[in-house]
Image (tube, coloured by chain):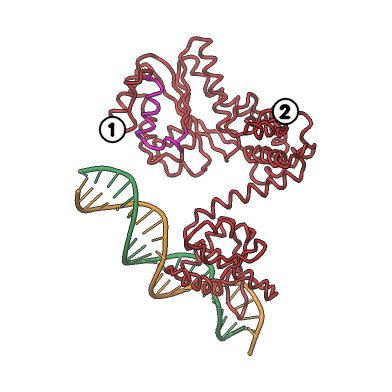
Chain colours: A red, B green, C orange
DNA sequence: CTTCCACAGGAAGGTCTGGCGG
DNA sequence: CCGCCAGACCTTCCTGTGGAAG
């Protein structure tokens, strides 16, 4: 039994340390974010004199380094604080995980309570009691607390923010500053104006990386991640270019590189090549879409199969025409009858088509066929066999799928 | 130029679920 | 526990429209 793992461990690895390429990894150098680091440090520096820094709001799309920069500067700050004997606390909270008023206060408070029996329970106390305990606890000594609220737009209700932005008026020794991080540029529009002005005392915007910058980042990490000489020289530029095209998302670029290498490894290839990158790109895309399709509502799944069926029929008849809403609706109704599922109205189905379009599974453009009306031109933008592979697992729609020879699939 | 198809897509209202304050 | 409300999900009804055909 041990042997199979031994062989996998030994020759498999192109990696020195795969973790370096994961999004959770905290690099010690952040290329092309020097300015942002400097800025944020500038804002934080009063903490070292025992004063509360301004609250900061940080915008930027995913993979632009917001979290990394904030954590990086925060860690440095705490270190410096220790050197200079100033009490500085840096608390990072991801609001996707801690998403309610209660849990937020609880989380911050527990950060300062060592003794297990005094910790605030997950549930059971009134929220204002948690608040009182929080203020009492942190106010025992004079210190500066920086609370980072990552993905702040995921917080439910703005009560939590309202409480936190005013907490300093209930404290006489400690001081609290907030850092809000969001990738939703419209987030503040819906906030209570008082919260908005308080949170936005300072604001920073993180712009996406361009291809050249992504390339630097990848090179930096690749040095630690891979054994020397494993990457074909064009691999990193290609990953960078592809990710830059997408949104300048560093996380995507790193994922792409990691998965490329994993594919190469699985093939027992001694080197990662451009071909692996292309394959990885396809895999990432399919994996993403697979997840979306799997979680689609039943009606959309049926609709999707109806599209595949219509598309195949068109191909068989060798016409260049694409599918129209009317034809598709008929096929959809037909599928619903076969499955004994109640069908939706055409109006509703039209909206479902738009949704599938927005999800990138199909494309649906409005075209006019003159005398023959206005409709949408519908076509798949995802390989049909991949979709069927996923929908086979759904017992409700599965009866529509038949298996021909040679792994071929057909729809009723 | 007008007609007219086959829908697009807006508006309003119904139904159901689930969270929340009292 | 109950009533209320918001929001997701649909239906019904509707007006609007690009462009080939006539």
As drawn, is A257 to the left or to the right of A82? right
Crowdedness of circle 1 by 10 Å Cα count: few (<14), some, many (20+)?
Answer: few
Q: Residue at x 45, y 14 (%)?
A: A87
Q: Chain of mark 2?
A: A
Q: Mark 2 falls on what kind of element?
A: helix
Label 2 environment density (alpha carbons within 10 Å; few <14, some 14–19, many ≥20): some
Q: Position of residue A250 (x, y in %)?
A: 64, 37
Left/right placement of residue A334 relative to residue A135 reads: right
Disc 1 element: loop
Percent position of residue A276, x then y: 73, 44
- Disc 1 target residue: A124
Q: Is residue A107 magenta?
A: yes
Give the quadrant of the N terminus of chain A. top right
In primary-sequence order, the first of circles 2 and 1 is 1
Image vertical order of residue A408 relative to residue A19, above or below: below
Q: How many marks?
A: 2
Instruction: Provide residue A34's location: percent of width, then percent of height.
Output: 64, 27
> Quarter-wise, where is residue A314 in the image?
bottom right
In the image, is C9 to the left or to the right of A170? right
User: Which residue range is magenta in the image?
Assistant: A94-113
Q: Residue at x 74, y 42 (%)?
A: A238
Magenta includes A8? no
Disc 2 target residue? A223
The chain carrying label 1 is A
What residue is at 65 percent from the left and 61 percent from the top?
A: A407
Residue A158 relative to residue A12: left or right: left
Say which of A234 and A133 sits in front.
A234
Residue drawn 60% across the image and 49% down it: A287
Real-space Cα distance between discs 2 and 1?
Answer: 50 Å
Which quadrant is the C terminus of chain A positioned in? bottom right
Residue A237 image point, x, y percent? 75, 39
């Amino acid at each position: 039994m041990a042997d199979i793992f031994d062989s996998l461990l030994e020759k498999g690895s192109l990696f020195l340390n795969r973790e370096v390429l994961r999004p959770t990894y905290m690099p010690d150098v952040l290329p092309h974010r020097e300015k942002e680091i400097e800025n944020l440090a500038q804002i934080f520096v009063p903490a070292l004199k025992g004063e509360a820094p301004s609250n900061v709001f940080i915008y930027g799309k995913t993979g632009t380094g917001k979290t990394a920069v904030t954590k990086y500067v925060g860690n440095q700050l705490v270190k410096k604080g220790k050197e200079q004997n100033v009490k500085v606390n840096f608390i990072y909270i991801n609001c996707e995980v801690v998403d309610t008023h209660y849990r937020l206060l609880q989380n911050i408070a527990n950060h300062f309570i060592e003794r297990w029996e005094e910790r605030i329970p997950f549930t059971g106390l009134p929220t204002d009691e948690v608040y009182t305990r929080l203020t009492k606890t942190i106010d025992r000594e004079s210190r500066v607390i920086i609370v980072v609220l990552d993905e702040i737009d995921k917080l439910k209700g703005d009560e939590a923010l309202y409480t936190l932005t005013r907490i300093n008026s209930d404290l006489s020794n400690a001081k609290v500053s907030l850092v809000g991080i969001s990738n939703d540029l419209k987030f503040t529009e819906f906030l209570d104006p008082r919260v908005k002005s308080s949170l936005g005392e300072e604001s920073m915007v993180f712009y996406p990386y361009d291809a050249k910058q992504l390339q630097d980042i990848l090179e930096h990490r690749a040095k630690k991640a891979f054994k020397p000489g494993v990457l074909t020289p064009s691999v990193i530029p290609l990953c960078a270019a592809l990710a830059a095209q997408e949104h300048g998302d560093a996380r995507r670029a790193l994922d792409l590189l990691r998965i490329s290498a994993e594919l190469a490894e699985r093939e027992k290839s001694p080197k990662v090549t451009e071909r692996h990158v292309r394959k990885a790109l396809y895999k990432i895309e399919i994996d993403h879409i697979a997840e979306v399709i799997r979680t689609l509502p039943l009606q959309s799944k049926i609709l999707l199969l109806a599209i595949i069926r219509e598309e195949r029929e068109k191909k068989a008849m060798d016409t260049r025409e694409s599918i129209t809403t009317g034809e598709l609706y008929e096929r959809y109704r037909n599928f619903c009858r076969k499955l004994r599922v109640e069908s939706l109205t055409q109006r509703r189905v039209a909206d479902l088509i738009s949704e599938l379009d927005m999800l990138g599974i199909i494309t649906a453009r409005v075209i006019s066929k003159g005398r023959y009306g206005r409709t949408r031109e519908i076509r798949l933008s995802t390989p049909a066999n991949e979709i069927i592979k996923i929908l086979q697992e759904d017992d409700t729609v599965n009866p529509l799928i038949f298996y021909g020879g040679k792994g071929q699939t057909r729809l009723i």
